[in-house]
Image (cartoon, rainbow, N blue to C red):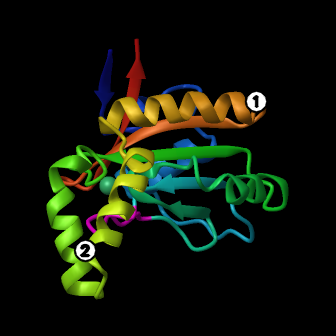
């Protein structure tokens, strides 16, 4: 189980994140913290490709990998690069509600017809493409997925701080996720 924790002041930020790069992200985006200037990235942000989301952060503040559902399983080399070469020590993993990577099977026909009509694909290829990749990219539930993905990343990169967050598309704010 989990609950979402909103941020209306700096004190609402979980103590382990406060004054850390992920806490600063929450302050910039939710609390209109005045932008500082950065010469190098402070953290890596993993977020969905969805067009409804836009982060309010200073230039140079973060590496950002955008992939459907904030799923970094197939972006591992880029994650490693941000840590090893970019020097970041934190990852904010931002899922969002109403994510298109939830229940992909419900959009199977739209997907196949769209590839046929919009891209000029053969129907059979489009169907094969969906059947091959939908199980890899399906995330099930937005919050459960970022929680499990955060766990996976913590095991993979033990010295890196990883926080699962949720972006609500209704209010464009970030929420912390309290795991229980
Ligand atoms: Zn999404």
Q: Is 113 inside the magenta-drawn segment? A: no
The label on residue 123 is 2
Whether residue 50 appears in magenta in the rendering, the answer is yes
How many neighbours does mark 2 have within 10 angstroms: few (below 14), some (14-19), or many (20 or more)? some
Q: Nearer the viewer, mark 2 or mark 1?
A: 2
Where residue 84 appears, x then y in whole percent?
A: 84, 54
At 54% across and 69% down in the image, what residue appears? 58
Seen from the viewer's position, the closer of residues 105 and 83 is 105
The N terminus sits in image quarter? top left
Q: Which residue is mark 1?
A: 158
Q: Position of residue 173 (x, y in %)?
A: 29, 50
Taking depth in this image into account, of 173 and 144 the one nearest to the observer is 144
Q: Ligand 1, what quadrant?
A: bottom left
Query: For numbered disc 1, what is the local secondary structure?
Result: loop
Residue found farthest to the front: 124
Q: Is residue 7 visible?
A: no
Q: CA distance from mark 2 to mark 1?
A: 44 Å
Number of on-image labels: 2
Q: Which residues are magenta?
A: 49-56
Position in image of residue 68 (x %, y %): 40, 57
Local secondary structure at mark 2? helix
Vertical side of 26 occupied by 47: above or below: below
Q: Residue furthest right?
A: 85
Give the residue drawn at x 23%, y 80%.
116
Q: Residue at x 55, y 54 (%)?
A: 45
Classify residue 107 as left or right of residue 8. left
């Amino acid at each position: 189980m989990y609950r979402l924790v909103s941020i209306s002041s700096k004190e609402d930020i979980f103590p382990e994140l406060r004054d850390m790069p992920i806490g600063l992200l929450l302050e910039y985006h939710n609390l209109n913290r005045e932008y500082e200037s950065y010469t190098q990235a402070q953290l890596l942000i993993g977020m969905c490709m969805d067009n409804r989301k836009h982060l309010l952060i200073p230039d140079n503040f973060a590496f950002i990998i955008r992939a459907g559902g904030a799923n970094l399983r197939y972006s591992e080399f880029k994650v490693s690069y941000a840590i090893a070469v970019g020097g970041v020590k934190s990852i904010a993993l931002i899922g969002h509600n109403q994510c298109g990577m939830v229940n992909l099977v419900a959009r199977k026909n739209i997907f196949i017809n769209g590839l046929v009509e919009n891209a000029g694909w053969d129907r059979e290829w489009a169907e094969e493409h969906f059947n091959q990749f939908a199980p890899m990219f399906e995330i099930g539930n937005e919050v459960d997925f970022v929680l499990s993905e955060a766990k996976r990343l913590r095991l993979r990169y033990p010295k890196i701080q990883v926080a699962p967050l949720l972006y609500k598309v209704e209010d464009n704010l970030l929420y912390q996720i309290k795991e229980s």
